[in-house]
Amino acid sequence: MPYVSVRELKGQLSRILRDVRERQEEYLITYHGRVVARLSPVSPSTQSVDEEQVRKVMRDLDRLAAEIGRRWPVGVSAVEAAREQRREL
């Protein structure tokens, strides 16, 4: 893994980013001779959103909202309930 100083990084940013993007190269960034950061490519799994996982979370939230709705006292708004909870603290 190559080292690059902050000064070099500033002067060669386009080339270094191209290496990271195209060659999946990682760089250690140094400041006054000490490593202060790592520049590395982002994996495709980190870049993309897992649509099925999002749908699952949304279904879970819908079920939770329905459960809360079934148990919610008639005639009590969320604002009133929050105010009441704050008074108890």
Image (tube, rainbow, N blue to C red):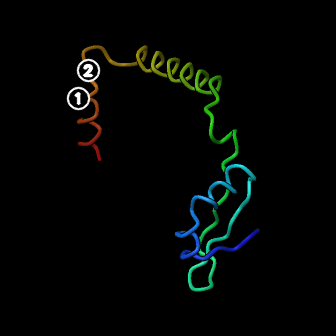
Q: Amino acid at mark 2?
A: Val
* Above or below: residue 13 compared with residue 77: below
- Mark 1: give few (<14), some (14-19) or many (20+) Cα within 10 Å: few
The amino acid type, in three-letter code, at marker 1 is Glu
Q: Which residue is more in the foreground, 37 or 84?
A: 37
Look at 65% across and 42% down and name the residue there.
46
SS class of the residue under badge 1? helix
| Residue at the farthest bottom position | 32
- Residue at label 2? 76
Question: In terms of depth relative to the viewer, which is nearer, 56 or 71?
Answer: 56
Residue 35 image point, x, y percent: 63, 77
Give x and y (percent) for residue 61. 51, 23
Secondary structure beneath label 2: loop
Quadrant containing the N terminus in the rendered view: bottom right
User: Marks 2 and 1, Cα distance to the nearest angstrom?
Assistant: 6 Å
Name the residue that disc number 1 marks. 80
Q: Are marks 2 and 1 in contact (CB under 8 Å)?
A: yes
Quarter of the figure with residue 78: top left
The image quarter containing residue 18 is bottom right
Q: How many marks?
A: 2
Q: Quadrant of residue 48?
A: top right
Residue under the image location 29 percent in, 38 percent down: 85
Reply above or below: 82 against 58.
Answer: below
Structural crowding at the residue carrying mark 2, measured as other residues with C-alpha within 10 Å and reported as few (<14), some (14–19) or many (≥20) = few
Residue at position x 56%, y 19% from top?
A: 59
Q: Nearer the viewer, residue 47 or 84?
A: 47
29 with respect to 62 (left or right): right
Q: Residue at x 45, y 20 (%)?
A: 65
Measured from the top left, where is residue 79 in percent x and y?
24, 29
Q: Does 46 sit left or right of 69 as displayed?
A: right
